[in-house]
Image: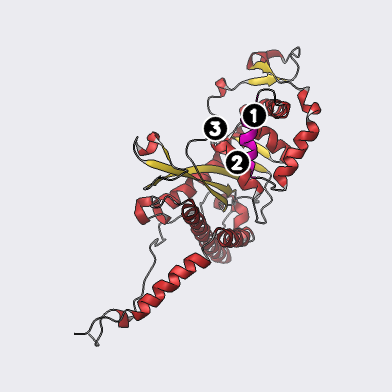
Amino acid sequence: MAWPRWGRARRGLRWTCCFHRWFLREETLKAANAVLVNYHHQLPLSAVWGGGIASSSDGQRFGLQQSSLLSSFYPRYFGYYERAVSVYTHLSDQYSVFGTRVISCSPREALYVLDGLLENNTILRLREHYTDTHGFTEHIFALSYLLGYSFMPRLRDLADQQLYKLDRKASFGKLDPLFRGTADAELIPEQWDQLVRVAASLKNRTAPANVIIQRLANSSPSDRLAKALTALGRAIKPIYILRYIHDEALRSRVQLQLNRGESRHDLVARCLFFANRGEFRTGDLEEIMNKASCLSLLSNAVLVWNTIQMGQIVGRLRAAGEEVLDADLAHISPLAFGHIIPNGTYWFDRDLQVADGG
């Protein structure tokens, strides 16, 4: 009996390794992901979920089998002895992922909210952004305003939120008990030129947004620019909170978009990230980021395929005289994955199985 001929298998494995090294890089993955997002945005059915003007961001925690600079202990989900990292993604109102970043579980996610918005290289023109409570600070309110975004976080424990007046002597009637402090409004016009320069630097990507926000947050109490940014955020936050309390449609819009992010997390955790029990095996940041970007690419591929198939089904139903309303289609998620085979389908060459014609 002769041994199997593995020459072709070796060549295939060598080509796979070269493909991974040459093509699966952050730049190429980001470009490929933008192609999928742009294509999906132009599909007729994608408009039923949104116009590509709103987005949300949230982190998803994954276990890490080796130590890494970004790893941290996260007892809430992983116990006291297992390390984890967070994959922070930005999702449009059409369910497409346009931003991915691997971060530590320790700092507030608010540091990375603006990174995905400013690094957006797709045709989506975003104007509104939603986060959960962990994703907002007063600095984010201020910088979002300066950059032209409507920042709309989902707020927990509203009774504990501190609201600020611009004028200590101003009275708002029955709303006065809600205000517990006064924003230093005089700093805003004084530092306005500097605030605009910070916004321009962020817009032109002269430095990562999370780095600038971290430095402003850690600045000394005498830093007037940081204090002016805080004052601007304190002036904007009460307006949004009062809208959030009064406008039920706004609260529903925020909750709907955040639920879309959770459904995308479900797709990744339960279907796409099936290898290594859904954990990152290596501690190398570049490889972790590579895998996180690949997960975003795969989830967008599932989104595009599902949207195309749903569009064809809807087209056939309408051609047959059935009434299919866009308002009803808006409640159907395009991230269903029960029909997805995550580990693929394989065909093996007969020459690689048994030699000597066996």
Amino acid type, label 1: Ser
Q: How many angstroms separate mark 1 from mark 2 (CA)? A: 20 Å
Q: Which residue is mark 1?
A: 219
Q: Residue at x 72, y 16 (%)?
A: 172
* Residue 67 in view in this figure: yes
In contact (CB < 8 Å): disc 1 and disc 2: no
Coordinates of residue 14 in the picture (x, y in percent):
42, 73
- Frontmost of labels 1 and 2 is 1
Which portion, as a residue range, is magenta?
A: 208-220
* Mark 2 or mark 3: whose residue is earlier in sequence: 2
Q: Nearer the viewer, residue 113 or 200?
A: 200
Q: How many angstroms separate mark 1 from mark 3 (CA)? A: 23 Å
Q: Which residue is mark 2?
A: 113
Q: Residue at x 24, y 81 (%)?
A: 3
Q: Secondary structure at mark 2?
A: helix
Coordinates of residue 316 in the picture (x, y in percent):
54, 66
Q: Residue at x 25, y 81 (%)?
A: 354
Q: Which residue is mark 3?
A: 133
The quadrant of the picture occupied by the C terminus is: bottom left
* Residue 249 in view in this figure: no
Amino acid type, label 3: Thr
* Mark 1 or mark 2: whose residue is earlier in sequence: 2
* Label 1 neighbour load within 10 Å: few <14, some 14-19, many 20+: some
Q: Secondary structure at mark 1?
A: loop
Coordinates of residue 223 in the picture (x, y in percent):
70, 26
Q: How many angstroms separate mark 2 from mark 3 (CA)? A: 12 Å
Is residue 20 rendered to the left or right of residue 319?
left
Q: Nearer the viewer, residue 149 or 177?
A: 149
In contact (CB < 8 Å): disc 2 and disc 3: no
**Relative to 169, does residue 330 appear above or below in the rendering?**
below
